[in-house]
Amino acid sequence: MKKLILNIFLAIAIFLGMMMATGVMQKQLLPVLKLKKELTKTAQGEATNDTLSAEEVSPLDSVSLMLQKIEAQREELATKLAALREKEKEISQREQKVEEELAQLRGLKDELSGTTSSQTSKLAKAFQAMDAGQAAKIAGNLDDRTLTDLLLQIRERNAAKILAALDPSRAARIYKQLSSKNLQASSQ
């Protein structure tokens, strides 16, 4: 990898040298080198001279400036890469935390589902023992989901009598839910 980078730098240096020989690079770097010369003279306390001839710009200075720019860009990219890797690590940790929380929620859901199933089973046994008219009066006070689960666990004959005693629109809604659950159960 280092050898590749050195070869690239060498190729750039050769290219820049060729451009310097043609004078193209000198015209482009002349303002930059003027500024560099002014800053150097100002720092040394000398008076600045606005004239910087093309002869004063050596190919070595041009290549040196280009290499400095490339190195600065490489350092900037390295900094950005480090920041990106840190963000990736943070995102990975957050994903792991979310997965753990989802697993906990699934466990709680399964636990609640088991509790609800056992309660519905007990209620179904009680409904099975009751008269259909009496069970229908109680069923009128249950929510649709509980009633649907309950009707799935009792004999069809008793379930039909309870549905017949309910309000027709509610009975239709419950029947639709029963049909959908029966289809799901048969497809599994």
Image: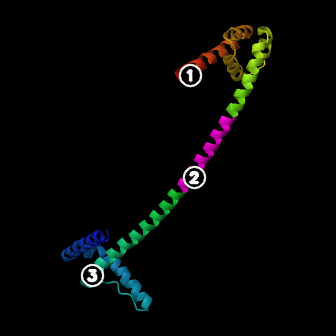
What residue is disc 3 on?
A: 60
Colour pattern of the rendering:
rainbow
Residue 68 visible here = yes
**What percent of the width, then of the height, locates residue 165?**
74, 8
Who comes first in sequence, dot 3 or dot 2? 3
Name the kind of residue labelled 3 in the image. Leu
Magenta segment includes 77? no
The local secondary structure at tag 3 comes to helix
Q: CA distance from mark 3 to mark 1?
A: 79 Å
Q: Nearer the viewer, residue 153 or 61?
A: 153
Read off the magenta span: 90-111
| Dot 2 crowding, Cα within 10 Å, few <14, some 14–19, many 20+ | few
What residue is disc 2 on?
A: 94
| Dot 3 crowding, Cα within 10 Å, few <14, some 14–19, many 20+ | few
Residue 144: name its quadrant: top right
> Which residue: 43% across, 87% down?
42
Name the kind of residue labelled 1 in the image. Gln
Q: Is residue 108 shown above or below 169?
A: below
The local secondary structure at tag 2 comes to helix
Name the kind of residue labelled 2 in the image. Arg
> Which residue: 40% across, 92% down?
46
**What percent of the width, then of the height, locates residue 153?**
68, 18
Residue 139 visible here = no
**Magenta span: helix, strand or loop, mainly?**
helix
> Which residue: 49% across, 63% down?
83
> Which residue: 27% across, 85% down?
56
Labels 3 & 2 near each other (Cβ < 8 A) = no
Q: Is residue 5 shown above or below 128?
A: below
Q: CA distance from mark 2 to mark 1?
A: 35 Å
What residue is disc 1 on?
A: 184
